[in-house]
Image (tube, coloured by chain):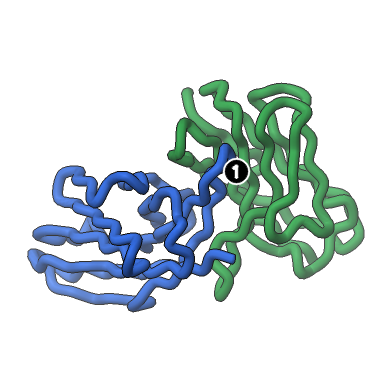
Chain colours: A green, B blue
Amino acid sequence: DAGITQSPRYKITETGRQVTLMCHQTWSHSYMFWYRQDLGHGLRLIYYSAAADITDKGEVPDGYVVSRSKTENFPLTLESATRSQTSVYFCASRAGPEQFFGPGTRLTVL
Amino acid sequence: KQEVTQIPAALSVPEGENLVLNCSFTDSAIYNLQWFRQDPGKGLTSLLLIQSSQREQTSGRLNASLDKSSGRSTLYIAASQPGDSATYLCAGGEGGSNYKLTFGKGTLLTVNP
């Protein structure tokens, strides 16, 4: 199917573990984004990427690492998960000025 | 730093009513304004995008306006239906090549049959 897919859709992990959230888009959009959504904060930008091998920090990058070796994939890694990283994570890509979002990954850190 | 506010946080209306959702932003240099819909447990669906050179956009029963000078955007929903029940988010896009979005916290709309 065309669009953005995220995996896993749900993940439970423990404090200190490394977790990678996957994002794949079929449109070949240059720009991709990672957001987190929390009650009381809304959506906040974690990292974004302008193209393969080009990434930059957003509003809340601490504790996260991204890579983009291929245009279609943009994985987000929590190197040592903390409880404060419990959230819903959304990946997005951009066509012109308009952004399109994936279905999200609900991550719980115990 | 751009800040986006949506009021009210929640709104409940009877079916058939016309309604307006409000979005305000602090930086008038906003490049575009995008409205999204989010159903519970789902991702965001793009509804309308208004670029800085435009004043409004329409799609079906939805009409969005943008007034940069007053720092406001509105989303008008005509003849509301129970299927319109969702959270509506607005997001301001900054200029340059990034078009990074700053989101409001959303308005939870409930349309009662």
Residue at figure coordinates x 80%, y 52% from the top left = A64
Q: Would residue B23 be seen by someone viewing this image from the given angle?
A: no
Residue at figure coordinates x 76%, y 69% from the top left = A84
Q: Amino acid at mark 1?
A: Cys
Secondary element at image label 1: strand
Query: Above or below — where is A31 with respect to B84?
Result: above
Q: Is residue A6 left or right of residue A85?
A: left
Say which quadrant the C terminus of chain A sits in: bottom right
Residue at figure coordinates x 44%, y 39% from the top left = A98
Q: Is residue A89 left or right of residue A2?
A: right
Q: Would residue A50 be seen by someone viewing this image from the given angle?
A: yes
> Which one is nearer the viewer's eye here, A71 or B25?
B25
> Which one is nearer the viewer's eye here, A76 or B65?
B65
Q: Quadrant of residue A74?
A: top right
Q: Quadrant of residue B21?
A: bottom left
Residue at figure coordinates x 8%, y 64% from the top left = B16
> Which one is nearer the viewer's eye here, B84 or A48?
A48
Q: Is residue B78 left or right of residue A88?
A: left
Query: Above or below — where is A14 with respect to A95?
Result: below
* Residue for badge 1: A91
Query: Above or below — where is B65 with respect to A102?
Result: below
Q: Is residue B6 left or right of residue A86?
A: left
Q: Tell me where residue A70 appears, x and y as whole percent.
A: 72, 22
